[in-house]
Image (cartoon, rainbow, N blue to C red):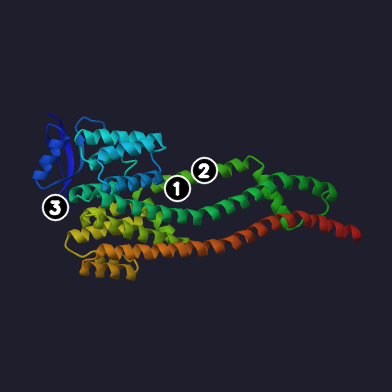
Amino acid sequence: MPTYTYVARTRDGRKERGNLTAANRQALVKALQTRGLVPDTIQEKGAKKGVAARKGPKVKTVEILIFTRQLSTIVNAGLPLLQGLDILSEQTEDPRFAAVMHEIGRDVEGGESFSDALKKHPRVFSDLFVSMIRAGEASGNLDEVLLQLADYLEAMEELKRRVKAAMTYPVAAFSMILLIAAGLIIWVVPQFEEIFSNLSNGETPLPAPTRLLIFISDVMTSWQALIVVAMGVGLVIAMRMYRETESGRYNLDKLLLRLPKFGGIFRKVAISRFSRTLSTLTRSGVSILAALEIVERTAGNEVFARAVRGAADSVRNGETLADPLMRTEEFPAMVTRMIAVGEKTGALETMLAKISDFYDSEVRAAVDSLTSLIEPLLIGLMGIVVGGIVIALFMPILQLSSLISN
């Protein structure tokens, strides 16, 4: 019989690791459940680890959202889960996602639970998705959990869309300004430099802005420009390598939260994601400690991930959730007080949902305000850059004209 390495959770949320010999995965799951353990990951010894994570297809969130909502309708209508998977695999337009659904259907037909079958495709279904499905299977409310998941994915997708909209416009507009300026400096300024040298014969010094513009043009059209480009590429690579480290992620995310205007949006997005994710998980029946661990992994910001990790440790030691969150000073007083009220009244998931709705509206208003502010600033910046180049080019011509007239 094969030997399996497992990671399971006790009733109080602690992790337990070990090895166990069983006839198959289903027998191992039953053996763990009789000992009061809930399996989290199971890996057969000698099997290749993480193949699905490395080679599995990546599916768009929109496809997963449609799949979740349609499967919820199918299960609620009383159709068998296997039949629902077959129907959805036939009508999906993404062949990779169809193949994933076929594999899940085969695993479920072979005796695995739906959540265990989903867990084999981590690039498609997140830990949050799998945990909520597992909770729905245990409670017998799979259709309701699927509906909650669909609502959650829809809200997160809308939030992501708004943040992208806030970032895309200024980046695109600023890139256009740089391209126009570079085009003028590289191709137009050298033509004027020849005209200036012919007109002045080196006797009349050029104005300072013109000399600076010609110097920049000479640098950008020479081999020195390659050094500048190489330095820029090296800086980007160094920043990416630094972000791969835990301290790098923390420091860079902390810097993002301190940016003027944008930092406030990033903070509100992180709070909204924390609140909605935790609300969705607790409403579906996931224990608070398991939910906090999932929230930590899906926080999207290392500063808030550390705050949630510390809160989870405090909750494990018997504290409430609100107190350790308040001590981190990353969450506004309104958030921690509403969480405290929710814990006292037994309506934590309701309070978290209200917090998320509030911050979603705050993000929406902040994005609209930022867009209306950035547009005239970028137009003004374009006018200054292009106008400055044009003025620097025409200043020698005006100077020579005044000398000729005198």
Q: Are marks 3 and 2 in contact (CB under 8 Å)?
A: no
Secondary structure of residue under mark 1 = helix
Which quadrant of the rendered structure holds the N terminus?
A: top left
Residue 5 lies, with reference to residue 210, above or below; the image says above
Residue at 21 percent across and 33 percent down: it is 110
Q: Counting other residues with Cα less than 10 Å from the Cα at mark 1, is it few (<14), some (14-19), or many (20 or more)? A: some
Alpha-carbon neighbours of circle 2 within 10 Å: few (<14), some, or many (≥20)? few
Reading the image, the residue beneath label 1 is 239
- Tag on residue 233? 2
- Residue 330 visible at all: no
Indicate the secondary structure of the residue bearing disc 3. Answer: loop
According to the image, label 3 marks what residue? Answer: 11
The answer to whether the residues at label 2 and label 1 have Cβ atoms under 8 Å apart is: no
Q: Nearer the viewer, residue 104 or 193?
A: 104
Q: Quadrant of the C terminus?
A: bottom right
Q: Badges 1 and 3: C-beta atoms under 8 Å apart?
A: no
